[in-house]
């Protein structure tokens, strides 16, 4: 009973600070209790071993807790790629929730996108025990195909994708689509490679690193309110200046064996973790 009361007081304190400031920085936000559902999904034996190896850089339990994911939520994950986060989200939501995996367009002419979507769909079909709560949709704002039912999602999440939409020229439309997908009060969670303040738009697109100001600008223009930031995915070792942009670092390691040990020592990129809310 005493422990339960302490947790209740902590949550009340957290909510009070949130309402008073409108913005909670990472030290407080990261202290939130990780739910048992999230922790179990992260520790699940159904996850692939190569994905588990990246937990040290991506901090999935802390990140999803910060985004307030709960087992009965309806979540839209934008461009899940090979399903690194999908396998965790699917584990959290499989009993009572729903995951819309909004992948690359079905009719895309980009070979990489074709292979990625086909491989993802094959895994969802083959691993029904894990992916039972997953519905594969698509996300490509120019096509006007919905990534999920309008105004019904509790969360829209995207991990390391904003630079791609900036390069494609539809970043603004992407955030407008996120706003339409969410119910009032719904949360948009964004993790993105973080550029140094003042980085030019050209350099953002070229390097894959985006400034926090740019992401906030895109989200607020679409109607979102920035609610909180977390430093859970920060990496002080990352200078953000590399020969092949963010893809110089693991897991891409675009330089191959050239200075491989140096970039492995840096680890994955420095990342912002931002939580927005739809009013």
Image: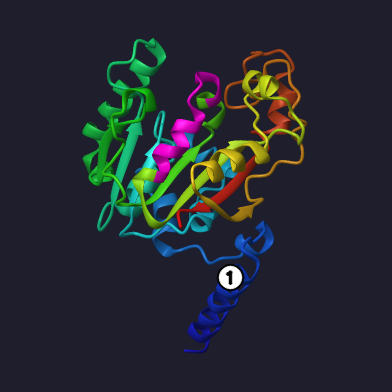
Query: Can you tell which quarter of the image residue 199 is in?
Result: top right
Query: Can you tell which quarter of the image residue 103 is in?
Result: top left
Instruction: State the extent of the magenta-drawn residues as a range.
Output: 166-179
The residue closer to the viewer here, 92 or 101, is 101
Answer whether residue 105 is magenta in the image: no
Q: Is residue 112 above or below residue 66?
A: above
Q: Is residue 3 above or below residue 79?
A: below
From the viewer's perspective, tell me whether residue 108 is left or right of residue 52. left
Q: Residue at x 65, y 67 (%)?
A: 21
Q: Residue at x 53, y 57 (%)?
A: 66
Residue lying at the far bottom of the rendered structure: 1
- Residue bearing the label numbered 1: 19
Query: Can you tell which quarter of the image residue 77 is in?
Result: top left
Q: What is the x, y in percent for residue 275? A: 54, 52
Q: Residues within 10 Å of mark 1 (few under 14, many from 20)?
A: few
* Disc 1 element: helix
Q: Residue at x 45, y 64 (%)?
A: 35
The residue closer to the viewer here, 213 or 53, is 213
Q: What is the x, y in percent for residue 156? A: 41, 46
**Magenta stretch prevailing secondary structure:** helix
Q: Is residue 264 above or below residue 35?
A: above
The residue closer to the viewer here, 228 or 230, is 228
Q: What is the x, y in percent for residue 53? A: 53, 38
Q: Is residue 55 visible?
A: no
Q: How many marks?
A: 1
Q: Is residue 149 visible?
A: yes
Q: Residue at x 26, y 42 (%)?
A: 134
From the viewer's perspective, tell me whether residue 172 is left or right of residue 150. right
Q: Is residue 248 above or below residue 237?
A: above
Answer whether residue 176 is magenta in the image: yes
Q: Identify the image's colour scheme: rainbow, by chain, secondary structure or one colour.
A: rainbow
Q: What is the x, y in percent for residue 82? A: 40, 29
């Amino acid at each position: 009973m005493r422990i339960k009361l302490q947790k209740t007081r902590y949550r009340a304190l957290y909510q009070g600070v949130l309402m008073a400031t409108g913005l909670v920085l990472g030290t407080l936000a990261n202290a939130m209790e990780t739910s048992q559902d999230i922790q179990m999904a992260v520790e699940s034996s159904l996850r692939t071993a190569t994905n588990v190896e990246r937990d040290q850089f991506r901090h999935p339990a802390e990140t999803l807790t910060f985004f307030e994911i709960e087992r009965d939520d309806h979540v839209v994950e934008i461009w899940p790629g090979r399903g690194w986060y999908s396998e965790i989200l699917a584990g959290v939501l499989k009993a009572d929730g729903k995951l819309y995996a909004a992948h690359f367009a079905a009719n895309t002419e980009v070979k990489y996108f074709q292979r990625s979507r086909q491989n993802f769909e094959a895994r969802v079909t083959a691993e029904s025990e894990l992916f039972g709560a997953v519905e594969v949709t698509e996300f490509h704002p120019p096509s006007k195909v919905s990534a999920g039912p309008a105004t019904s999602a509790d969360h829209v999440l995207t991990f390391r994708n904003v630079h791609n939409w900036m390069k494609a020229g539809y970043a603004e439309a992407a955030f407008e689509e996120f706003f339409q997908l969410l119910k009032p009060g719904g949360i948009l969670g964004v993790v993105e490679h973080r550029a140094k303040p003042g980085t030019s738009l050209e350099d953002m697109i070229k390097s894959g690193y985006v400034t926090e100001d740019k992401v906030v600008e895109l989200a607020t223009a679409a109607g979102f309110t920035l609610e909180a930031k977390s430093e859970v995915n920060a990496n002080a070792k990352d200078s953000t200046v590399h020969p092949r942009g963010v893809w110089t670092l693991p897991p891409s390691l675009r330089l191959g064996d050239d200075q491989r040990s140096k970039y492995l020592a840096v680890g994955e990129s420095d990342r912002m973790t931002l939580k927005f809310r739809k009013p």
